[in-house]
Image: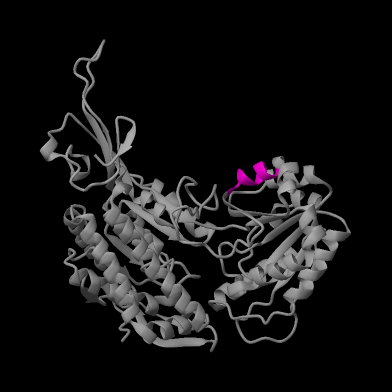
């Protein structure tokens, strides 16, 4: 049962008078639930509780934290159809997507649990003393990673489960040993409340300190701002727009004690289509990309919003086929009227730019809040001259750029902002012939794909979901995969410390039996 209350540790709270409702985009009306905006007092209570919880939680063993994460996954699954139905009602997304995203969310939690069980992620390094070293003795120095403290996570609009309440940011922060306060996304606050109940039940069942997790409601920006500015908050995780992410980043750096903001933001995910792809598989690629562009109404941060090729009849054929295929696909509902309105606005703005040709625009009647896909074409010169054409249009939309030659194509890549992904379609010979193009693309992205589509992100240790600004605020880190844990920790060195008082990961006996770097050699000794 959804109550609309805030979860401050294991206590439900609704002290405020400001309320809001979530929205059913398919039925184009508010849901039946009313949610209470968190007050300043409730925010302070959640922060204080989390700060006290950190004193205990950071010392809890990796095995017990692993049990906690696994139990969260179990409790999410136990929510059953109520979670699925709430998700679909608040997002307009189909049941299959809801069940798939729930599976991914549980999979992420269990993946981080496995990381904790193995324990080598702390990167223990041991360099023993050399008292007889000349000309100066060397101290015993040991290093490992420790949690930062309280992390605030902002739920994402487009992934109500996998990037929200118990999503990758929360799972990785809890794994690192950091308590989490989630600022629930107002578009799916009911889904967030249900998932929050699962996390809190799991915390109670596994003996985690009260306050290790809280969930706060908000329909505006004030709650988020207060959380980011709170002196006891030590880091922020965010998935959303460039405007939202940069605003939080600026706010965090204006504090007396600046804190890191790990924001995954906008991207148009350039796709470079090289000659052999046009020669051999043009129609097949056009069909695949029509599906990729429209997947989930285009509401993916990895949506291919830019396709770049060298002009000619083959590229024209690809554009015609892409435009033809995208109009065959049934348009789907977007997450919210506001998102739909911004999509319409962005599509109209870019379609009206000089030199732009609209090659496809779905014009049949559709239901409310339904995204009508569109494809634009523009020359390389016009694209370079007009940075408005470089902006993300969040929805089933893509721009195809026709370049004079490979040199112009490379120049365009060098002038793009940072991106989450970059894709090259072609042959291995193409890669050899166009090394400069490959290098230019690699310099702008966090993930390089060859002969594929960028939509879809595998949760694994080798994944990078991030990239140069503004794709993310720190290109050194990923928000997806087990390496995401590295965002919420910092290294600490112990010099000449008594062995028995060292953290177990650094003790001579290696009681955790983990892999460590000892005198430059990886070992379990």
Q: Is residue 385 visible?
A: yes
| Percent position of residue 421, x then y | 59, 55
Q: What's the magenta region?
A: 437-445
Say above or below: 383 vs 203.
above
Q: Is residue 42 left or right of residue 418?
A: left
Query: Secondary structure of the magenta portion, mostly?
Result: helix
| Percent position of residue 328, x then y | 74, 80
Say above or below: 381 vs 111.
above
Q: Is residue 104 left or right of residue 117?
A: right
Q: Identify the image quadrant of the N terminus.
A: bottom left
Q: Which residue is drawn at 50% across and 46% down?
A: 475
| Percent position of residue 268, x then y | 63, 58
Q: Is residue 444 magenta?
A: yes
451 and 323: which is toward the camera: 451
Q: Identify the image quadrant of the C terminus.
A: top left
Q: Which residue is drawn at 31% across and 51% down?
A: 234
Task: Write down the quadrant of residue 399 in the picture.
Answer: bottom right
């Amino acid at each position: 049962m959804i109550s609309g209350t805030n979860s401050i540790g294991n206590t439900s709270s609704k002290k405020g008078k400001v309320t809001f409702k979530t929205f059913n985009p398919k039925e184009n009306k508010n849901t039946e639930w009313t949610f209470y905006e968190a007050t300043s007092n409730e925010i302070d209570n959640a922060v204080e509780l989390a700060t006290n919880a950190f004193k205990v939680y950071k010392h809890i063993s990796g095995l017990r934290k692993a049990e906690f994460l696994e139990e969260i996954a179990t409790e999410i699954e136990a929510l059953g159809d109520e979670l699925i139905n709430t998700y679909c009602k608040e997002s307009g997304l189909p049941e299959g997507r809801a069940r798939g995203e729930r599976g991914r969310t549980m999979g992420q939690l269990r993946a981080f649990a496995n990381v904790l069980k193995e324990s080598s992620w702390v990167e223990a390094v041991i360099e023993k003393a050399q008292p007889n070293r000349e000309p100066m003795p060397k101290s015993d120095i040991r290093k490992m990673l420790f949690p930062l403290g309280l992390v605030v996570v902002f739920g994402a609009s487009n992934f109500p489960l996998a990037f929200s309440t118990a999503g990758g940011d929360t799972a990785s922060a809890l794994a690192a040993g950091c308590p989490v306060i989630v600022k629930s996304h107002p578009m799916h606050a009911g889904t967030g409340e249900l998932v929050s109940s699962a996390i809190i039940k799991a915390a109670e069942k596994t003996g985690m300190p009260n306050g290790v997790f809280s969930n706060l409601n908000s329909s505006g920006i004030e709650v988020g701002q207060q959380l980011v500015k709170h002196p006891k908050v030590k880091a922020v995780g965010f998935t959303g727009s460039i405007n939202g992410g940069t605003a939080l980043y600026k706010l965090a750096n204006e504090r007396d004690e600046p804190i890191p903001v790990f924001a995954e933001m906008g991207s148009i995910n350039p796709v470079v289509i090289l000659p052999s792809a046009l020669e051999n598989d043009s129609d097949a690629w056009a069909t695949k990309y029509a599906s990729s562009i429209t997947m989930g109404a285009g509401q993916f941060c990895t949506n291919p919003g830019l396709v770049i090729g060298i002009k000619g009849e083959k590229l024209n054929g690809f554009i015609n086929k892409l435009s033809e295929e995208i109009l065959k696909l049934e348009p789907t509902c977007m997450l919210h009227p506001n998102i739909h309105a911004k999509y319409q606005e962005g599509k109209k703005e870019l379609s009206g730019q000089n030199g732009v040709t609209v090659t496809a625009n779905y014009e049949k009647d559709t239901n409310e809040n339904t995204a009508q896909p569109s494809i634009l074409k523009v020359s390389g010169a016009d694209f370079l001259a007009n940075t408005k054409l470089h902006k993300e249009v969040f929805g089933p939309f893509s721009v195809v750029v026709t370049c004079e030659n490979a040199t112009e194509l490379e120049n365009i890549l060098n002038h793009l902002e940072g991106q989450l992904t970059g894709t090259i379609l072609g042959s291995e010979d193409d890669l050899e012939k166009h090394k400069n193009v490959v290098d230019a693309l690699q310099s702008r992205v966090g993930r390089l794909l060859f002969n594929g589509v960028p939509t879809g992100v595998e949760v694994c240790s080798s994944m990078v979901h991030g990239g140069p600004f503004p794709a993310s605020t720190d290109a050194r880190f990923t928000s997806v995969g087990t390496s995401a844990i590295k965002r919420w920790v910092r290294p600490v060195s112990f010099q000449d410390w008594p062995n028995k008082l060292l953290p177990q990961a650094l003790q001579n006996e290696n009681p955790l039996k983990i892999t460590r770097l000892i005198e430059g050699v990886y070992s379990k000794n």
